[in-house]
């Protein structure tokens, strides 16, 4: 499965989850997340894209580079170092930094670590394993959603229902609550690809936004614009335009995928790339 957009949304919606991953307490993680801005950045000189970057909002804090690894890649540490040092070269060569790799499981970690051992020993490179993260019934929502990714197809639905109930009772902010519920639903779509979107919503007992008039109008508009944008050459660009148009109207990615009859992973990828490009453009303007 294509996990990059999913993890982008997880850390964007619940940035304290990253600092919980680093071993901070719930209170410290929330306070630290408030001191950072999370982005997906692309380094145009090298065409390298990092899965996520936590940029400090104040001087003295390290910038964190994040890579999520769900397949075997012997060069993962080298790739992360290239991206980190490219960023330092282009921005502030004296900026403290830390590279973090989240492996799906330990067996995906490269065997040849000699070039990176000094960085690992110094804590400049850190590695974590999703299937070894401790589980706790009272873990913060972000960590619990992260743990949902490693559960079996039999366990995941019940856990997701519990997480949705927790989200409704623990999250006072209506917009954040909607984002977290949508994120839980998206994880289940990844975990149970054989089920339809309607079946998953029934399983999780969540409201189907597609029944609303606003959704129907946005869906029809998006489909028309997607078709009008081009034939064979511009088909992907047209679909991407329609995806971003519907996202701008506030439609959840899972519903966009259903409306445009596209894979959820593709929808999330388009949205994540658009956000990364926008953040990069803003950074360029600020530096000009």
Image (tube, grey):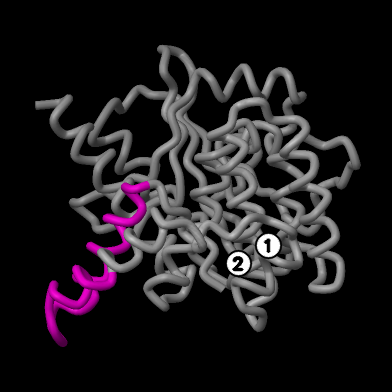
Judged left or right of residue 55, residue 32 is right
Compare residues 254 and 193 and report the one nearer the observer: 254
Instruction: Estimate the x, y position of residue 184 in percent, counting from the top left.
Output: 66, 53
User: Of helix, strand and loop, which one carries label 1?
Assistant: loop
What residue did someone put label 1 on?
A: 104
Compare residues 58 and 139 and report the one nearer the observer: 139
Start and end of the magenta stretch?
223-249
State the quadrant of the N terminus: bottom right
Q: Is residue 10 visible?
A: yes
Which residue in the rendered view is the most extreme toward the top?
A: 59
State the quadrant of the C terminus: top left
213 lies above or below 61: below
Looking at marks 1 and 2 on the same chain, the residue that comes earlier in the sequence is marked by 2
At horizontal 47% and vertical 68% (from top left) the residue drawn is: 265
User: Of helix, strand and loop, which one carries label 2?
Assistant: loop
At horizontal 72% and vertical 68% (from top left) the residue drawn is: 107
- Tell me the number on the disc at residue 70: 2
At horizontal 40% and vertical 65% (from top left) the residue drawn is: 267
Instruction: Estimate the x, y position of residue 83 in percent, counting from the top left.
Output: 37, 48
Judged left or right of residue 191, residue 227 is left
Gap between marks 1 and 2, in whole Å? Answer: 5 Å
Q: Identify the main secondary structure in magenta.
A: helix
């Amino acid at each position: 499965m294509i996990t990059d957009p999913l993890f982008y949304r997880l850390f964007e919606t619940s940035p304290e989850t990253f600092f919980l991953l680093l071993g901070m307490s719930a209170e410290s993680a929330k306070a630290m997340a408030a001191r950072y801005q999370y982005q997906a950045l692309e380094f145009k000189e090298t065409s390298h894209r990092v899965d996520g970057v936590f940029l400090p909002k104040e001087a003295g804090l390290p910038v964190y580079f994040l890579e999520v690894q769900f397949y075997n890649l012997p060069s993962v540490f080298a790739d992360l170092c290239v991206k980190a040092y490219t960023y330092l070269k282009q921005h502030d060569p004296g900026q403290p930094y830390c590279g973090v790799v989240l492996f799906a499981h330990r067996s995906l970690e490269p065997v040849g670590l000699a070039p990176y051992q000094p960085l690992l020993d110094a804590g400049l490179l850190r590695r974590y394993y999703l299937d070894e993260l401790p589980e706790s019934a009272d873990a913060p929502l972000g960590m619990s959603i992260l743990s949902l990714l490693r559960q079996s197809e039999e366990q995941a639905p019940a856990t997701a229902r519990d997480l949705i109930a927790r989200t409704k009772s623990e999250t006072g902010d209506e917009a954040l609550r909607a984002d977290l519920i949508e994120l839980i639903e998206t994880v289940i779509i990844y975990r149970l690809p054989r089920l339809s979107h309607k079946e998953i919503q029934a399983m999780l007992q969540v409201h189907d936004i597609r029944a609303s008039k606003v959704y129907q109008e946005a869906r029809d508009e998006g489909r028309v614009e997607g078709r009008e944008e081009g034939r064979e050459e511009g088909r992907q660009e047209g679909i991407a335009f329609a995806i971003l148009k519907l996202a701008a109207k506030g439609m959840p990615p899972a519903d966009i995928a259903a409306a445009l009859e596209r894979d959820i992973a593709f929808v999330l990828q388009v949205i994540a790339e658009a956000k990364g490009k926008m953040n990069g453009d803003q950074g360029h303007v600020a530096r000009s």
